[in-house]
């Protein structure tokens, strides 16, 4: 059993993202996506601060100002805006389609990284992106007007919001890479510290957005009526707490265990199986109709992510690099603390975003 700890941890992380998607969907139906996003960000921030104190003995990481700004922008775009779109998509189109739409994030990250980070795309990367986008399109274009089971209020809008969520995650990850790459030579930052900075800025920004929406009376208030229990504060609080625990605590920890023990490409592919794992869950809990097309499309999208990650050779024509440089670049955009363990990649706190491997 010990030989498969890395693989089991990756599968466990993928299962955690399924749980968070389901509980945040139900919470969003009761109180609205904006309230859920802000509340779970505050819960995650508290958890991160406590973990940071336990691990490093301090509340705040030590970063140069440039790193703070880049990571701060990453938190605003990826966590405050990107996850706001995602949580609204969970309500509008359901957890299955929303989770599937987020598989576009690695492809978009690779595309943006080409001009911004000078990380060219190889042929296998293009193939992987094509498979992922093809799988998503195959599912989204399915006509389900007469299909039995649960229907969602605004499926088309949900697909568009899910796509915007993927864009937000991709852009946020690029800024995270820039922020962690700006750290002075010889001073490295642990993945938890970098995520803490992102979470801090994301939480503040999402809270300001909530205040603005309340002030203009344009805040979404969920789709459940009061008679259906929309206003049960204890239920919503429990749902958000469960989502925060399975996301920033168990999900991130399992992803770190997986990346540490097995090849990064294999770990990333296994952790991307959430759109497949969620199929029986939504069939049982949401009573959603799952046809062969939905299964095939999800498998195709995950296969594309696997090809994109596992066979990414960083493009053609790159100059040879020494072993130390290659080791640093292939490990992760996350960086380490003074005297910490070797570099590891980390899944971001939000259950649908993750720090991609460097594409150089």
Image (spheres, rainbow, N blue to C red):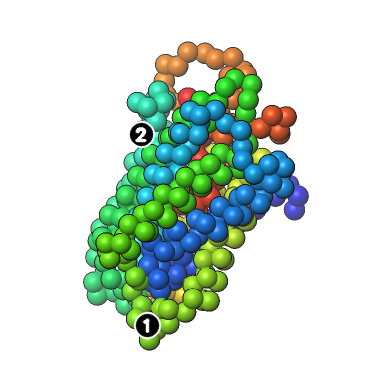
The 10 Å Cα crowd at callout 2, few under 14, some 14 to 19, many 20 or more, is some
Where 147 sits versus 328, above or below?
A: below
Where 223 sits versus 180, above or below?
A: below
Q: Which residue is mark 1?
A: 226
For the point 47% across and 13% down, the residue is: 319
Residue 286 at x, y percent in the picture: 42, 74
For the point 66% across and 52% down, the residue is: 50
Which residue is at the front of the view, 30 or 321? 30
Task: Tell me, yes or no, if residue 106 can be seen here.
Answer: no
Q: Which residue is mark 2?
A: 111
The 10 Å Cα crowd at callout 1, few under 14, some 14 to 19, many 20 or more, is few
Which residue is at the front of the view, 231 or 242? 231
Distance Cα–Cα, label 1 vs label 2: 44 Å
Q: Nearer the viewer, mark 1 or mark 2?
A: 1
Dividing the picture into quarters, in which one does residue 331 lie?
top right
Residue 125 at x, y percent in the picture: 41, 34
Q: Secondary structure at mark 1?
A: helix
């Amino acid at each position: 059993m010990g030989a498969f700890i890395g693989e089991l941890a990756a599968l466990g992380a993928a299962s955690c993202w399924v749980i968070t998607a389901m509980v945040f969907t139900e919470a969003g139906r009761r109180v609205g996506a904006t309230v859920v996003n802000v509340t779970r960000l505050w819960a995650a921030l508290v958890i991160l601060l406590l973990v940071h104190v336990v691990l490093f003995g301090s509340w705040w990481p030590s970063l140069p100002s440039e790193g703070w700004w880049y990571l701060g922008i990453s938190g605003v775009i990826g966590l405050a805006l990107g996850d706001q779109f995602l949580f609204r998509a969970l309500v509008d189109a359901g957890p299955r389609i929303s989770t599937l739409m987020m598989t576009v994030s690695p492809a978009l990250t690779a595309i943006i990284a080409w001009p911004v980070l000078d990380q060219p795309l190889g042929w296998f990367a293009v193939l992987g992106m094509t498979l992922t986008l093809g799988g998503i399109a195959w599912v989204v274009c399915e006509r389900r007007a007469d299909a039995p089971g649960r229907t969602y209020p605004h499926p088309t809008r949900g697909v568009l919001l899910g796509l915007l969520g993927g864009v937000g995650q991709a852009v946020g990850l690029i800024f995270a890479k820039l922020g962690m790459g700006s750290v002075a030579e010889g001073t490295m930052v642990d993945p938890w510290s970098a995520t803490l900075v992102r979470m801090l800025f994301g939480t503040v920004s999402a809270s300001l957005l909530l205040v603005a929406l309340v002030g203009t009376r344009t805040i979404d208030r969920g789709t459940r009526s009061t008679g259906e229990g929309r206003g049960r504060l204890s239920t919503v609080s429990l749902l958000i707490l469960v989502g925060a625990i399975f996301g920033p605590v168990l999900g991130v920890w399992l992803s770190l265990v997986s990346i540490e023990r097995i090849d990064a490409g294999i770990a990333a592919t296994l952790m991307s199986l959430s759109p497949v794992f969620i199929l029986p869950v939504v069939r049982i809990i949401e009573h959603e109709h799952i046809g062969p097309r939905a299964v095939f499309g999800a498998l195709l999208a995950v296969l594309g992510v696997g090809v994109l990650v596992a066979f990414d050779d960083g493009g053609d024509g790159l100059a040879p690099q020494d072993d130390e440089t290659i080791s640093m670049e292939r490990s992760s955009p996350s960086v380490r603390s003074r005297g910490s363990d070797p570099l590891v990649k980390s899944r971001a706190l939000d259950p649908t975003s993750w720090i991609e491997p460097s594409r150089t």
